[in-house]
Image (cartoon, rainbow, N blue to C red):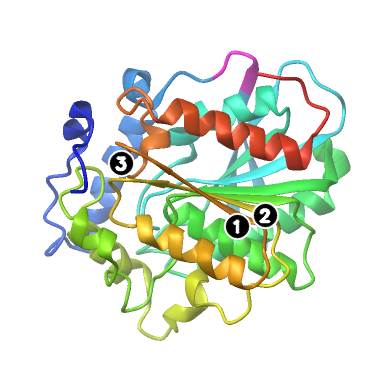
Amino acid sequence: MRGKAPFGTRILRDATEWETVTEEELIAARERTNRLASSKALRIVSGLPDRRARICETTIDLPGRRLTLRVHRPNHAAEKLPLILSFHGGGFIAGTGVQNDWLNSHLAARCPAIVVAVEYRLAPEHPLPLPVDDGYDTLVRLVEDATEWEVDPSAVAVLGESAGGMIAALTALRARDGGPALRAQVLNYPATDWTETMTDYPSITDNADNPTLSIPRLRAARRFSLPPTLDPRTVSPLKADDLTGLPPTLVVTAELDPVADHGSRYVERLREHGVDARLSCYPRATHVFLSTPGLVPAARPARREILAFLRGHLNPGGFEE
């Protein structure tokens, strides 16, 4: 690796045999890890939610499916607040909104905003582009029902980590072409290339021994989530022909992350197309570090940066930290 990962991240190293894992084994492993992510015991790693925000779960009915939404609301705030739509990581094959409670609740309390984490459908049962459809369709529905949700439809942002960052970026691209207007997007260590060149980046080689994202897991995620009939360029923001007209963007990357170059290259392309894009790379940080603040100290300054960015674009009059 380019540097030494924080000692505690070793406990996150995955022993799954990703080269040979079957669909049944994958689904069983996902259920186990998501139960663990939702347990109170793991809060020592994933961080305690901000007490100034309350968290509840609800459902949303979309054509042909019902999704669970994890909603973070500030305890005391005005009637209409900005909306931040959040997407968890997990390679489209795992993950749950609970793993982002530490970040999402803090943003809700301090922006302030309504932060809605989408429990989008997962592969292999629901391969791409279905998770992206879930993201975009949820955005459209929440904006349409802004009064019911007590959100300001003119102050909306998307936020995602890893595969969720890919969903956020693709949602922003769809929204640009006639969908709800977005004020900002925040992409935390996003995967932006799901084509055959996914692993052809220096950061992949440099950080192949990262304890929080192995290269075999990355390849397995692509194998299970990408149908052979789907052109991978259509779900790879980095490969999009036209990136003009996208909202101001913050891309947060980790120095020790195999997909760090996915984020930095995306920022380069956004700037080439005239988008106001900022790249912030955190030293001694690993993939998913914003979901493991108990192990990676860099999570706290990164959270402050994300808050300041979103507040500046969604709620310039919000109170200070």
Answer above or below: position of 244 versus 312: below
Q: Does the magenta stretch mainly form a helix, a strand or a loop?
A: loop
Q: Is residue 58 left or right of residue 300?
A: right
Q: Which residue is at 19% across, 43% downward? A: 211
Which span of residues is magenta-colored? 50-54
Q: Residue furthest top?
A: 51
Q: Marks 3 and 1, Cα distance to the nearest angstrom?
A: 25 Å
**Can residue 124 be seen in this snapshot?**
yes
Do the residues under discs 3 and 1 have CB atoms within 8 angstroms?
Answer: no
Q: Report if residue 51 lies within the magenta region.
A: yes
Tell me the residue at 73%/32% (across/down): 113
Quadrant of the rendering where the C terminus is positioned:
top right
Judging by the rendered image, the residue that carries numbered circle 1 is 135
Specify which label sits upstream in the sequence, 3 or 1: 1
Q: Amino acid at mark 1?
A: Gly
Q: Is residue 320 left or right of residue 240?
A: right
Label pair 2/1, CB-CB below 8 angstroms: yes
35 versus 270 height, above or below: above
